[in-house]
Amino acid sequence: MTRPSRRHLLASGLAALGAASVPPFAAARAVSDDDASADGLPGRTPHTRFALNLEMWYGALPFGERIERAAALGFPAVEFWPWQGKDLDDIGRRCREHGLAVGQFTAWGFRPGLNDPANHTAFVEAIKQGCDVAHRLGAEVMTVVGGDDQPGMTQAEMHAHIVDGLRLAAPVAEDAGVTLALEPMNIRVDHKGHCLYGSPPALAICRAVASPRVKIMWDLYHMQVSEGDLCGRLRDGFDQIAYVQLADTPGRHEPGTGEIHYPRVLRQLFELGYRGFVGLECSPSVPEDEAAHRVALADRW
């Protein structure tokens, strides 16, 4: 999840696209002809169940038509950011018609901060509403964000407030059968001034809450920027993973455009036993259909 993209939709992604250095289009086409799927549909991969992020892919299309593109490419699921302001009936109808799951959506964003106890009552109410939305859409995971730094509070105090807020909301999630996925960000590139980054503090928070319905949104892009050692960190924190997202770095584009060797990382995730969705929260560096074939290659090992 990236705050600039959410607040400005695709503006930052388009800017990065213009500045990024990517392989020539012809070379990308040659690679995509040799995809990892059995029937040529890049979304149908043998190991990893990818969820197309509807906010960062096909932004030129109306929201509902993005779901149609995800289905046409063979993806089993989609994901999106806040549910407010979206036609939930249309999303649900289109997903049901195409057999698509809603992997996750955002139930609580950056502001107001979960790390401020003054917002905890509103947070619990938002989780109640989010659980209702999750039931309407058949979703099992909702993302929650810790919040930006609070003036006058130490990081330890802010993290303790996140624990308290999640403890208040945990019974709601448990009763609803919906998992809250707390997302640590990175402050080196995307989220300067955010209070939660890297896996160790996120693990400490979720283990302190000690609820089967409060886990981590494990965004591999944020983790690489914050700490690296992706496979080792996955092993250390696997018991607390609710959902996984990916993007390559630098650039936050699709796998194969940066420094992360995603076939190795996704294989590690699969061997650990993860069978949930992996959200494609990345900005395609080439036309989206082309980028989808690059994603498929990340599932080849």
Image (spheres, rainbow, N blue to C red):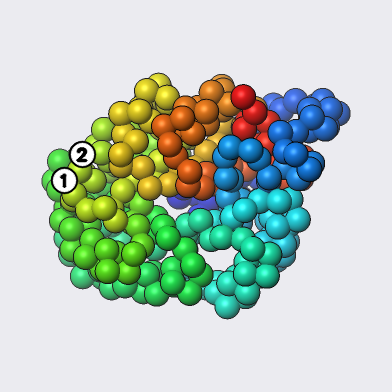
| Residue at figure coordinates x 15%, y 41% from the top left | 156
Mark 2 residue element: helix
- The one nearer the camera, 10 or 274, is 274
Spatial CA distance of label 2 from label 1 is 6 Å
Q: Is residue 109 above or below residue 203?
A: below
Q: Picture coordinates of residue 21 (x, y %)?
A: 69, 26
Tell me which amino acid carries mark 1.
Answer: Ala
- The one nearer the camera, 132 or 164, is 132
Q: Picture coordinates of residue 1 (x, y %)?
A: 46, 47
- Label drawn at residue 204: 2
| Residue at figure coordinates x 21%, y 70% from the top left | 121
Where, by quadrant of the figure, is residue 32 drawn? top right
Would you say 145 lies left or right of 124 here? Answer: right
Q: Picture coordinates of residue 176 (x, y %)?
A: 32, 69
Mark 1 residue element: helix
Which quadrant does the C terminus fall into? top right
Would you say 15 lies left or right of 73 here? Answer: left
Would you say 194 lies left or right of 267 here? Answer: left
Mark 1 Cα shell of 10 Å, populated few (<14), some (14-19), many (≥20): some
Residues at marks 2 and 1 touching, judged by CB atoms closer than 8 Å: yes
Q: Picture coordinates of residue 98 (x, y %)?
A: 68, 64
- The one nearer the camera, 187 or 297, is 297
Where, by quadrant of the figure, is residue 289 drawn? top right
* Residue 144 visible in the snapshot: no
Of all residues, the one furthest to the bottom in this rendering is 89
* Residue pointed to by mark 1: 208
Mark 2 Cα shell of 10 Å, populated few (<14), some (14-19), many (≥20): some
- The one nearer the camera, 241 or 291, is 241
Q: What is the number of callouts on the image?
A: 2
| Residue at figure coordinates x 56%, y 60% from the top left | 101
| Residue at figure coordinates x 40%, y 41% from the top left | 218
